[in-house]
Image (cartoon, grey):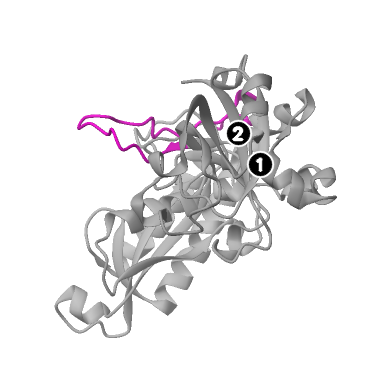
Amino acid sequence: MTDDIWEGRSVYIKGLYGWTPETWAAIGWSDNRRETLIKNTTDPFIMVTYVIKTSKEASADIRGKIVGFYIVSHQKGHRDEFTDPIHFQRQPDKWINALKAVRAFSFLPEYQPDVYAFDPSLKNGSQGKASTGVELNADKIKELRLLPYIEVPIFDPTYKAGRTIDNVIRVPSLNKVRGGPQNRSGYTVEGEPLETEKELYALCLDGDTSHFLGESANGRKIYKIGLSISPRTRLAAFQKALPEGTYRWKLHRSTRGDKHQPYPHFEAALAGEDSIKEYLAQHAKHLGGEFYAVTDAHFQKAWQIGREAALQEINKERSV
C-alpha cells in the first residue's frame, strides 16, 4: 500500500460520535441520503471522519479532531450487518441505511488536526454537514495526504483466520525530513520508516509494582523507554497487548509532552535513547528489553541526560 490509496477515489468528510472501526464498519443514515452518495462517488470511496465536538461517547482528546478514514464500498445493508452486536441496542432506529466500510486507517494521534481549523465552513451548520458528508476539494485532500497514518482493524462478521492488515506507519514523502548520519546501529523501530522525525518517550506501568516484581519496589516504578514518530500509537499497542486487569500503561514523558519539537531524524533520538539506557544500566534494575524498574529521581536524571544527548547529536551533525 502506498499513498495511491487516495488516487482516483471520491473523498468526503463526515462527523461521527466516535472512532471505533474495530466494532463499527459502516457509514449510515436514517434517511435516503445513502442513494445520493452512491450516485456521486466512486466505488469504493474514502470517507474521512472527525469526532463531533459535543460527543459524550468519545474521549476528550479526540473530540473535534479528524481521526482517520474509511474505505467505503457501495454495498448496502442494515447497519447491524456491519457492526458488532454490542451496538445493536444503541439508538436502534438511527443510521440504519448503511454502506459497508472495508478498510480503516487512523491518522497518528500527534498529527490529528482540529476539524474547524482544517475547514472552518464545517462549523457553520455543522450538524447537517456532519450527518450528510461533505465532498472535499483537491486542496483539502492534499492537506490530509500529508498526514501520517496506519491501517487499523475493522469489524468483519465474515472474518477468516489468517486475515491481516498492513500495520506499517505510512508517512507521505512530502512529510519526511532530511535524514541524519547513516544508521550504523542496525536498530530500527518496527513499522516506522527511518527518515521521519522521532520523539523520545517513556511509558510507566500503573499498578502495584511490588506485586508485579515479586519483591519490594522500594520506591521504584516500571518504565518502558523508546523512540517513535508517535508515542501515543506505541502506548495503544502496548496497552492492547496487556491483559485487562489492574495494571495499565500510561504515557509518562515524551518530547512533545515536554513542549519540545520532535528530533529531526532517527539518529538524534537514538543517541538520546542510548544515553538514557546507559544511565539506567547503572542506576536501575533492568527487566529485559527496554524495561526498567527505577526511582523517580533516577528516571528524571536519565530523561534529562537523554534529551541533552539528542540535542548534542543534532548540533554535531549540523557542524559537519
Residue at the extreme top of the image, as rendered: 8
- Asked if the stretch drawn in magenta spans residue 153, the answer is yes
- Determine whether, in the image, residue 311 is placed left or right of residue 76: right
Secondary-structure class at tag 2: strand
Query: Considering depth in this image, is 267 or 125 the residue closer to the camera?
Result: 125
Q: How many marks?
A: 2
Q: Name the main secondary structure of what is drawn in magenta.
A: loop
Can residue 154 be seen here? The reply is no
- Name the amino acid, label 1: Lys
Q: Which residue is mark 2?
A: 47
- Name the amino acid, label 2: Met
Look at the numbered discs 2 and 1 and tell me whether their residues touch, using CB distance below 8 Å.
yes
Q: Position of residue 9 (x, y in %)?
A: 62, 19
The quarter of the picture where residue 242 lies is bottom left
Q: Which residue is mark 1?
A: 14
- Determine whether, in the image, residue 263 is placed left or right of residue 249: right
Q: Which mark is residue 145?
A: none
Magenta residues span: 151-180
Query: Considering depth in this image, is 25 or 258 the residue closer to the camera?
Result: 25
Q: Quadrant of the C terminus?
A: top right
Query: Considering depth in this image, is 206 or 130 the residue closer to the camera?
Result: 130
